[in-house]
Image: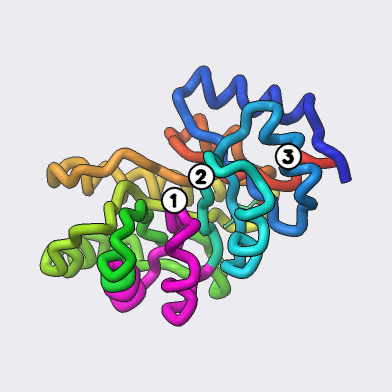
Amino acid sequence: MAVNRINLEKIKLKCSEKGALLVAVTKFQSIEDMQVLYDLGVRDFGENKVQEIIRKAPLLPQDIRWHMIGHLQSNKVSALLPYVYRIHGIDSISLLKEIEKQAIKQNKRVHALLQFHIADEDTKFGFDPEKALEIYSEIEILSLQNTKIDGVMGMATFTNDKIQIAQEFDVLKATFESYKYQNIDIKELSMGMSGDYELAIESGSTILRVGSLLFE
Ligand SMILES: *Cc1c(COP(=O)(O)O)cnc(C)c1O
C-alpha cells in the first residue's frame, strides 16, 4: 500500500474549510506509510485495537495524538492510557468509570467521546440516542476529574443510500445539539468515514475518521 496523496489533500482541504479535524485511520497500515502521512502533516491517528496503538506508538514520532476508535474492553484500559489522546467509543457507564479510575491512578488526562448507536444494524455499539440526557445525568454523578467528555461519536449504516446516512447523521447531530442546549460543555461531533465523509461534513461533523481513502 501507499499513501493516496490526492485524496489526503482533498480531505485536508475540506477539513480546513469547515474547521474539522482529520483522524487518519491506520488499522492494518504499515509504519512506513504512517510516517509518510506524518511527513505530510497528519498528527492524529486512529486505531481500533489497543495492541496496535501500543505496538506502533514507540515506532513513530512522539507528538502524534492517538485516537482509540474501536470497541474498548475495560480490561485493556490500563494498558491503553499511557498512549491514548482520545477514546472515541464510550458505550457504557462502567467503561467510563474504569477509564476515570485508571486515569487517576496513572495521573493522566484523557479525552473521550460518547458513542451513540445511529445505524440500522445490530452490530454497532453505542448508547441509545433517545436516552442521551439520562445518560448524561448518570455521568454527571461521577464528577469526572481526569476524563474529559468532549463530544459524541457515531457510525452510520454501511449502505449506498445517502438519504438514510444523512438521516442517521442528523440523529447524532440532534443528540449533540440537545447536549449543547443543556449547556453541557462539548464541542466534538465525530462522524464520517471514507464512504460518507462528505455527507458527514455537510451535516456538521467536527472530526472525520477516514482510513481506506488515504491509501491505494
Ligand atoms: C475503520 C474505521 C474507520 C475508517 O473506515 P474507512 O472506511 O476505512 O475510512 C472509521 N471509524 C471506525 C470506528 C473504524 O473502525
Q: Is residue 148 above or below residue 89?
A: above
Count neighbours of disc 3 (C-alpha within 10 A) and say few if under 14, some if 14 to 19, many if 20 or more: some
Residue 13: where, in percent of width, then height? 61, 20
Which image quarter holds the C terminus? Answer: top right
Q: Is residue 32 above or below residue 128?
A: above
- Residue under numbered circle 1: 85
Disc nearer the start of the sequence (2/1): 2
Q: CA distance from mark 2 to mark 3?
A: 14 Å
Disc nearer the start of the sequence (2/3): 3
- Residue under numbered circle 3: 35
Q: Position of 105 compared to 48: left or right?
A: left
Look at the numbered disc 1 and give the secondary structure of its residue. Answer: strand
Q: Report if the CB atoms under discs 2 and 1 are less than 8 Å apart.
A: yes
Is residue 92 found inside the magenta-colored segment of the image?
A: yes
Q: Residue at x 17, y 42 (%)?
A: 181
Count neighbours of disc 2 (C-alpha within 10 A) and say few if under 14, some if 14 to 19, many if 20 or more: some
Q: CA distance from mark 2 to mark 1?
A: 5 Å
Q: Amino acid at mark 2?
A: Arg
In the image, which residues are magenta? 71-100
Q: Amino acid at mark 3?
A: Gln
Residue 3: where, in percent of width, then height? 81, 36
> Considering depth in this image, is 101 or 162 the residue closer to the camera?
101
Disc nearer the start of the sequence (1/3): 3
Look at the numbered disc 2 and give the secondary structure of its residue. Answer: strand
Instruction: Give residue 64's quadrant in the image.
Output: top right
Q: Amino acid at mark 1?
A: Tyr
Q: Residue at x 50, y 30 (%)?
A: 202
Is residue 72 found inside the magenta-colored segment of the image?
A: yes
Instruction: Give residue 139's quadrant in the image.
Output: bottom left
